[in-house]
Amino acid sequence: MDYKLTDWLPTTRREMELRGWDVADVIIFSADAYVDHPSFGAAVISRLIEAEGFRVCVVPQPDWHGDFRDFRKLGRPRLFFSVAPGAMDSMVNKYTAARRLRSEDAYSPDGRHDLRPDYPTVVYTQILKQLYPDAPVVLGGIEASLRRVTHYDYWQEKLRPSIICDAGADLLVYGMGELPTAELCRLVERKLCHGRDDSFASASDFRQLLRKYPVRQTVTLERREDICGGIRPDDIMLNAHETCLHDKKAYAANFRHIEEESNKLHPQRILQETGGKFIVVNPPFPPMTTEQIDRSFDFPYTRLPHPKYKGKRISAYEMIKFSVNIHRGCFGGCAFCTISAHQGKFIMSRSKENILREVRKITQMPDFRGYLSDLGGPSANMYMMGGKDRGLCRKCKRPSCIFPRICPNLSNDHRPLLDIYAAVDAMPGIKKSFIGSGIRYDMLLHRTGDAATDKGTELYTRELIVRHVSGRLKVAPEHTSDRVLQQMRKPSFVQFRQFKKIFDRINREAGLNQQIIPYFISSHPGCTSEDMAELAAETRDMDFRLEQVQDFTPTPMTVATETWYSGYHPYTLEPMFSAQSPREKSAQRQFFFWYKQEEQQKIMAELRRIGRLDLIERLYGVAPQARKSQEKRKNDSRKEERKAVRNSRSKRK
C-alpha cells in the first residue's frame, strides 16, 4: 500500500499545514520513536484523540538540550500537552540491573542512546512548564503509572514522591489511558474551550475544573481544602511521604493498599499526604469491554514507523511488526511484575472478528512472508478468561487468580484460544502462527473437573506444542526453590518438571525436535546463594545450560521491590532477606553459568563458603578432594609434557 505523509499524525509544523491546521488541540511529547502501531502507547492515545474529533500532533524524542526548539515548533495546544515517556519504563529501557548502559535503546532509531533523557516525564514537563507556564500538562504511560505515589527509585537509591510532584504537571493518567483520556478531552473542550478555535485552556482553570469534575483513573496534587468532597470515611489514607522517608515498615505497609485497590472491581480512592498537600488517586475505570478494546485496535494505523526514519532500524518495531496482541491484563500477580499495576489483573479480550481484521492487514504488508511471530498477550493463554461468577469477583481483592492455587471461580477454558488459532491459520496468506508470549503452564496442568473444559486444555497443550512453537518454547519457572517461588507468587518447580515431561512426550509423538527454554531470576527477595546453588544443580540435572536469565531489577510498584528496599514483606510486615550489595548479587548470578570454565573457581569458592561441598560434586561430577587430586594430576601431566618438549628441542639443537 502506498502511504502519504498525512497518513501519519503531524510531527512538524509543515505536516500540520498539509492538513490545514494552525493550532493543535493536544500535543503529545513521546520519548519513543513514532511508530504508528497499536503496540506503541503514544500511537494508540494519539489515534484515540483523533477519533474523538480533536487535532492531535506527536513530537517524538524531542531534543531537550539548547534552545528547546523541538518543544517550541508546534506552539501551544488548545487543550493540553501530554507527556508519554515510552512503552517501557525509561530507566529499565536504558540501564541493566547492574546500572550499566544497555547495548541499545530498542525504541530509538538504530538503537541510539542519546535520543531520550533519564526520566523523560520529568525532563519534558519541566521544559514545557518553563516555556508555557500557563498551559496544562498531562502525564501518562508506564513511567507515570508506576510512580503515582511515593516509590523507591533503584537508580537514585532513594524514595521519591509521586512523579506529578517532581515533574510539576497538572494531572497524571495511570494505566491504559484510552478511557480517561477520552473523557478528559471532552470535559476540557466542553467546559473550558466551548468548541471555539481561539479559546485555550489555562493550567489554573484546568486544575479547578478537575477538582469539580474529577476524572477516574487520574492523579492530582491538592491542598486539603480543594479535595473533591473533602476527605471521606471510605478514602484509603496511605502513610505520608515524609513518614516513609524515615520508616521503612510504614512505606512497605502502603503497598498492600495500593495493590489491593488496583485489583478490585470497585476500588476506593487513595490519598497520600506529601509536602503539606495530598496526592489524590482517583479509582480506575472498570475493565474495558470487548467493544471498547476493539475500537482501540480498529484505529487507522499505518502499522509503520514515521517516514522520517526511512533507512533506520527500530528494533522494538521489528520484533512486533508481525505479531498480534489478543488481550490485555494478567491475573498471574507475579511479585516482580508491573503488568497488573499498569494494565490490571482483569482480562480484556478482543473479539475474534477484530483479531482477524488485524491479521488480514498484516498479510497485506509487502514484506510479510506468511509467518506471524506471536498471537498472544501479557500471558498468552488467558484470552477470554475471568470469573465464572462475577459477583464473587466484586468481593475479591486477591492480587492473583492462580496463586497460591487456581481459584475455583476462574474459567480455565482454552477452547476460545483454539478457535482463534484455527481461524487465523485458515486465513489466506498465513503459513504459520507462532506463540511468542509467555505461557502459564500451571494453567495447562490444572484440571477443573469439567470434562469439556479439561479436554479443551489437553487439546490446547498439544496444539500449542505441535503447531505454534518456532523450535523453542519459552516459559518462566523463575526458580527451583519452592520457598523462593512462594515469594515470587509462582507455582512449585514440580509443575515445571511435569510440563517438561508432557512437552517432551508430545514432541516424540509428533516427530519434532523442539526445546523448552526456561527463564530464571537471581537475587529476588527471599533468595539466598544456597538457593541459587541448588538452582544450578537442579537445572544441570535436567541438561539445561541457562540462557534466559535476569538479575532482579527493582522497579516501582511491585511487591518484590517494596520488600527488597524496605526489608519487610508488605503483606506480613515480617523481615525478609534480599541480596543487595554488588558482591551478594554477583554471588547469586554466577550460579546461572556453572558450565563456564571462567566461573568454576568462583562458584566452588562460594560453595565452600556456604558449606555446600556436596553441590561441587553434583555440579562438576567429582568430590572436592578428588577434584583437587584430579587437577593436580592434570597440572603435573602438563608440566611433564612441557618438560619433554623442551628436552626434545634441546636434542635437536
Image (cartoon, rainbow, N blue to C red):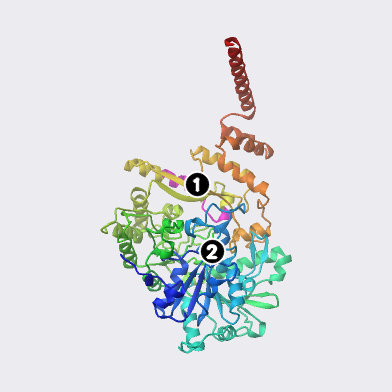
Mark 1: amino acid: Val
Say if 72 sits above or below 340 in the image.
below
Residue 603 at x, y percent in the picture: 62, 38
Which residue position holds label 1? 494
Which residue position holds label 2? 399
Residue 292 magenta-highlighted? no
Spatial separation of the CA atoms under disc 1 and disc 2:
23 Å
Judged left or right of residue 645, residue 440 is left
| Residue 447, image quadrant | bottom left
Say if 301 sits above or below 499 in the image.
below
- Residue 170 visible to an observer of this rendering: yes
* The disc label shown at residue 55, or none: none
For mark 2, give the secondary structure.
loop
Mark 2: amino acid: Pro
Q: Which one is closest to the eye, mark 1 or mark 2?
A: 2
Judged left or right of residue 137, residue 42 is left
Q: Find the magenta span and give its range.
A: 486-501
**Predominant SS along the magenta part:** helix
Pointer 1 or 2: first along the chain: 2
Residue 237 at x, y percent in the picture: 65, 75
Which image quarter holds the N terminus? bottom left
